[in-house]
Image (cartoon, rainbow, N blue to C red):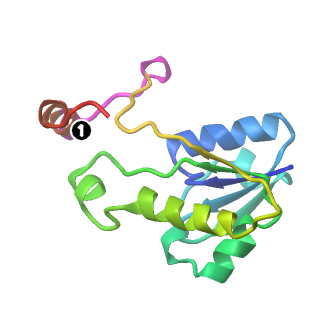
Amino acid sequence: MRVLVLGASGATGKQVVKQLIEKQIYSRIVIRKSAVLPEEILENPLVEIVEGNINELNDSEINNLIGECNVIISCLGHNVTLKGLFGIPRYLVFDAIKRISGAVKNKANKKVKLILMGTTAYTNSLSRETNSMGEKIILSLLKLLLPPH
């Protein structure tokens, strides 16, 4: 089994990859060139690292990315900042999942499980995470203006 993890350098993605390593599952991870990963992920032989922006890959590169993978886990998300919420790429998750699911659909004889994960605006107090004042203001405004998703 091989698992493709999108957004592996984020808080959720790192945890997913660590759990895959613990279970001795091969993983292919997609990270930005500027991403920072812990040594336990960077140097693990069970992890294949692909550097790049998922929305900048062409169809052939997407097909190569998902080839050999039985499971795709998307941990893509936006940073809780004004630029992260309203800047480019505005529809990062939507566009990436649309392309990935289209590529999987074209592989009619292969079954692939697609898992979407999201922790937008989640703060893990057990890990002593805290929100900055800016994040608190944005989250408060969003709670007032948007219906629960």
Above or below, 60 relative to 93: below
Q: Is residue 130 magenta?
A: yes
In the rendered structure, which segment of residues is drawn in magenta? 125-136
Residue 60 vs residue 23, the one in the foreground: 60
- Give x and y (percent) for residue 108: 76, 65
Would you identify the image quadrant in which residue 137 lies?
Answer: top left
Q: Is residue 95 magenta?
A: no
The residue that mark 1 highlights is 135
- Give x and y (percent) for residue 135: 24, 38
Quadrant where the C terminus sits is top left
- Give x and y (percent) for residue 55: 49, 71
| Residue at figure coordinates x 51%, y 41% from the top left | 11
- Give x and y (percent) for residue 56: 50, 77
Above or below, 111 relative to 142: below
| Residue at figure coordinates x 62%, y 37% from the top left | 15
| Residue at figure coordinates x 75%, y 67% from the top left | 107
Residue 99 vs residue 132, the one in the foreground: 99
Q: Is residue 49 left or right of residue 91?
A: right
Residue 97 vs residue 13, the one in the foreground: 97
